[in-house]
Amino acid sequence: MIDKNLIASRFLKSFSTYDDNAFIQNIMASNLIKFIPIKVFNSIFEVGCGTGILTKYIKTFFSYKNYTANDIVENSQKYVQKIIKNSDFICGDIEQVKINKKFDIIISNACLQWCNNLDSIILKLLNLLNINGFLAFSIFGQSNCYEIKKLLNISLNYTNIKEILNNLDNCKIVYIGEEIKKFFFDSPIDIIKHFKLTGVNSITNIKFTKNKLKVFEKNYKKFFVEKNKCYITYNPVYVVLKKNK
Ligand SMILES: C[S@@+](CC[C@H](N)C(=O)[O-])C[C@H]1O[C@@H](n2cnc3c(N)ncnc32)[C@H](O)[C@@H]1O
């Protein structure tokens, strides 16, 4: 089970450094909006808006009348309302909060992998859409950060999205795609720091002993180095669904 208190506190701590370090999340946000065929909506609901990286893209490329944003971190409201002044904010765990509005598009960048049950959150979000509404999200796939899984056996439970989508009967798949992106760092420690600066360390409360850190560094340099740089692999997945009943 994912520890939601840990997520909220780690992301809150990372907010001041997030935008300068969230390279992959930024790429994902700019890609995600390209896969949505319509850019004019009455109502938009953004899930897990954080510091508003995706919000800025939506503000630039979409037109809308009503904007509602959500995050488990309350402080996120300040960031989003700086970008979209008259937006509404629903604070809370998207798996738990009750929402009694419907929207024309629900959009979420690099957030839903933090949910315990992806099947039910997709159903919940589809239920919050008007007919012909879109659910568009980016998430991480099964090869994400496999270096960390291999060396430390730490990983989120990355679900096979295609399997989930095959079981949905009230929507059509408008787009599904994935990519593999490697980012290079001077050392394994820089990779761990990079996780911390973007809140991705919310996954576990692990503390490195000196010895554990040494072994980790040694193995990282042995297995995951190219041209003298250590790399980490990201596996973004993009999904756009259109609700048809
Ligand atoms: C990697 S950040 C992405 C932020 C933003 N979407 C972006 O494009 O940069 C993930 C965000 O999801 C939020 N989050 C994680 N789990 C959540 C949940 N269960 N409900 C609502 N927000 C959640 C975190 O607080 C964080 O702000």
Image: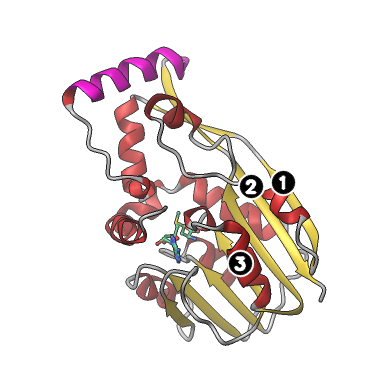
| Residue occupying the point 36% across, 16% down | 219
Q: Which residue is mark 2?
A: 237
- Residue 177's disc is 1
Q: Position of residue 205 (x, y in %)?
A: 27, 45
User: Mark 2 or mark 3, which has the lower sequence index?
Assistant: 3
Answer with left or right where residue 22 lies relative to residue 39.
Answer: left
| Residue occupying the point 58% across, 65% down | 121
User: Mark 3 or mark 1, which has the lower sequence index?
Assistant: 3
Q: Which residue is mark 3?
A: 107
Q: Residue furthest top?
A: 222
Report helix, strand or loop for mark 2.
strand
| Residue occupying the point 45% across, 15% down | 223
- Report if residue 33 lies within the magenta region: no
| Amino acid type at mark 2 | Val
How far apart marks 1 and 2 lie (CA) works out to: 6 Å
Using the rendered view, name the quadrant where residue 66 is placed: bottom right
Q: Main secondary structure of the magenta part?
A: helix
How far apart marks 3 and 1 lie (CA) works out to: 16 Å
Quadrant in which ligand 1 is drawn: bottom left
User: Mark 1 or mark 2, which has the lower sequence index?
Assistant: 1
